[in-house]
Image (cartoon, helix red, strand yellow):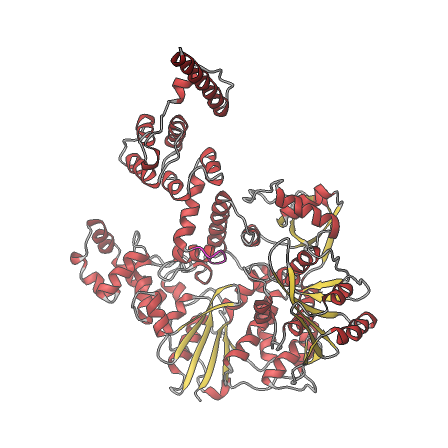
Amino acid sequence: MTDKFLVIDGSSLIHRAFFALPPLMNKQGLHTGAVYGLCNMLLKLLEDVQPKYMAVAFDKSRKTFRTEMYADYKGQRKPTPPELSEQFPLSMKVLEAMNIRTLELDNYEADDIIGTFAVHAPENVEVIIVTGDRDELQLIDNRTKVYYTKRGISDIQIFDEAEFAAAYEGLVPRQLIELKGLMGDTSDNIPGVPGVGPKTALKLIKEYGDVETVLENIEKVSGKSLKTKLAENKDAAILSKKLATIYTDAPMELAMENYELKPVQESAKALLQDLEFRNMYERFAAILGGETEVFSLFGDIVEEDAAELVSVDEIIAKKLFADLVKSEEKIALYVESAGALPKLYFSKAEIFFDNKVYVLEGAEAPWQDFYKWLSDGSSLKAVCDSKELYKTCLCHNVHPQGIVDDVTLAAYLVDPGHSSYVLADLAKRHLFSEASTDCENVALLVKTLRESLEQREQVQQIPIGELFPFKNHPFKVLDDESMQRTVESVEQYGVLSPLIARPRPEGGYEIISGHRRQHAAQLAGLDNLPVIVRNMDDDAAVLLMVDSNLQRENILPSERAFAYKMKLEALKNQGARSDLTSAQVGRKLETADIVGQESGDSRNQVRRFIRLTNLIPELLDMVDEKKIAFNPAVELSHLDTNQQRDFLEAMNDTQNAPSLSQAQRLKKLAQEGHFSYDVAFAVMGEEKKDELDKVVIKNDTLRKYFPRSYTPKQMEDTIIKLLEQWQRKQQRQNER
């Protein structure tokens, strides 16, 4: 089997961990969140890749040979937050205690260290690069892969030569520097050729192969403007290519034996204990080897043998539930529901007790005994997705008691940015080793997630009057049927999931996640709410606020539109880093991908939703109310404010909703300078195939006969009454 060399871009990953995870501090006040995130990711990589060799590269300073070539290289980047700066040397100290080599070089970036390994590692060694920087994709070859961290530190895309070609329309990895030479890179402040974007750059490199050949063939390039831009910026293109090229001959040790993984040092145990990383030493030692008698995953010995499965019938149920009531242990429970409201029912239940998994399944199982145990508050239970459990129980007039842990809620509090919190996904994200049954995974998750929460933050009880809505919060809090159900739940069970908020400079707290829960609590008459307080900057707060709300089932088009817009701006602000926002062939494309990926929307659909934010409020309300369809609304968003108001008047006067073709024609007329109220009225008054016998009366005509206070509905009702009177009069005349 080919030996593997795992090369980590430490600067990229610790930066990502810092912004992806809540801030952590140990008792001494040392910031540790980024180091903790880095360690967890390394554990996962070690388990998945199983390398023989490993190295972690860091940037030593911003001053490199590239800044000597171009003083403004990366010059636009914000200073590193001090809370992050202090964690770089700490992370290196932790890695060295793990006997994992760390590297940094004066005058070079981490990219150059990684590039040198990629080129000079022995031919029989497979190089696996882990980074959040797309620049390193240029290093891919037949033995080098890049594990690209797309989002946070857990969402990874594996790039080999085939994957790169698919992403970049047939280019080879080395041609990434050619693209950067033409289009530049805003994240690194590489100038490129002004006015040449990703699409143009890709087209030129596909046709000519490299920057130099493009510049030699300027006269053959189509478009006068593009020719001028290329001719006037030849030096900038060549410079940009040089800046984007990773150096592959950095002065460093290359002998593989210097990077072979070794057992963890005993000194690492005390260091990790000081950092309050519980069980981190044992987890590394289990993989790398080290001085430990027993591998204790989440505090308990991991058994190799699978737990015994026991099918529960009426006889077994009597003893089982009697023993459960007597037990002082917290019992892990997993249930599956079937059917639909109001006739939900449990189709399966797993109970982990005494190292056995007891299973109730099917209609013949002793469910009444199970319900009785669920209702016993003296028996403590840990579950997954208590919301669904409560819903099913209510369908059977069962009131669960004693539920003290919910791994779904805990996982959300630990990492709220995911679209899925089903048990299978939680196990993959948080467990070092998954169990064979669902209830065992619940038991393992309870321990590891509680540990994570203890290291992160505490839930506080905060007076409801000290909680204020998020500035420009795009999601509406409505007193509808759904809210009434939430109020009833809060009255009965309280607020089960803590809100997330951040301190306000002027006092109190700004809600990031939990506006509906706060409103429901107000209606239910609660005085205090459970809240997790986080110190977050504006961009990080926006991302969390949007992602947590986009998981809701019913979202209005206007809500999604403004949410996408806020998230897009936050991503751009957060990173002028390519590892956060760079696209496959340019920063903007990928940013739109990131915005929509949690909701399943494509980059184009994201942009179409954002277009809706250009609509005047009256038209946007009509989109929410389904009076105007989504696609015509996108076309109408290209009209300016005055044109939209003229259109709205024409729409009201004709009493017609725009079709897609009508909206497209109005957009074109506006672009050509031919738009007016009369034009809009003419277009909207056209007979449609399904409205051939429709009669249109202009609003101005009708208003002559009605008071200004009359609504359109009142006008319609009056007209109908008058028509009915006229019809009766005509009938009487015909009878004479």
- Compared across the picture, whether 588 is left or right of 202 comes to right
Decide whether the magenta segment is chiefly helix, strand or loop.
loop
- Compared across the picture, whether 450 is left or right of 110 comes to right
Within the magenta stretch, is there residue 598?
Answer: yes
Which x, y percent locates residue 155? 50, 66
Question: In this rendering, is residue 336 above or below 225?
Answer: below
Q: Nearer the viewer, residue 149 or 600?
A: 600
Within the magenta stretch, is there residue 301?
Answer: no
Rendered-image quadrant of the C terminus: top left
Q: Nearer the viewer, residue 658 or 187?
A: 658
Rendered-image quadrant of the N terminus: bottom left
Question: Quick check: can you spot residue 597?
Answer: yes
- Compared across the picture, whether 441 is left or right of 723 comes to right
Write down the quadrant of residue 172 in the picture: bottom left
Give the extent of the magenta segment: 597-601
Residue depicted at 18% across the width and 61% down the height: 217
Q: Nearer the viewer, residue 162 or 627?
A: 627
* Residue sticking out furthest to the top: 736
Question: In this rendering, is residue 79 above or below 39?
Answer: above
Question: In this rendering, is residue 513 above or below 297?
Answer: above
Which x, y percent locates residue 10? 51, 71
Q: How many marks?
A: 0
Write down the quadrant of residue 419 in the picture: bottom right
* Residue sticking out furthest to the right: 326
Question: Quick check: can you spot residue 26?
Answer: no
Residue depicted at 60% across the width and 54% down the height: 536
Which x, y percent locates residue 386? 67, 60
Residue depicted at 77% across the width and 74% down the height: 320
Q: Nearer the viewer, residue 501 or 25?
A: 501
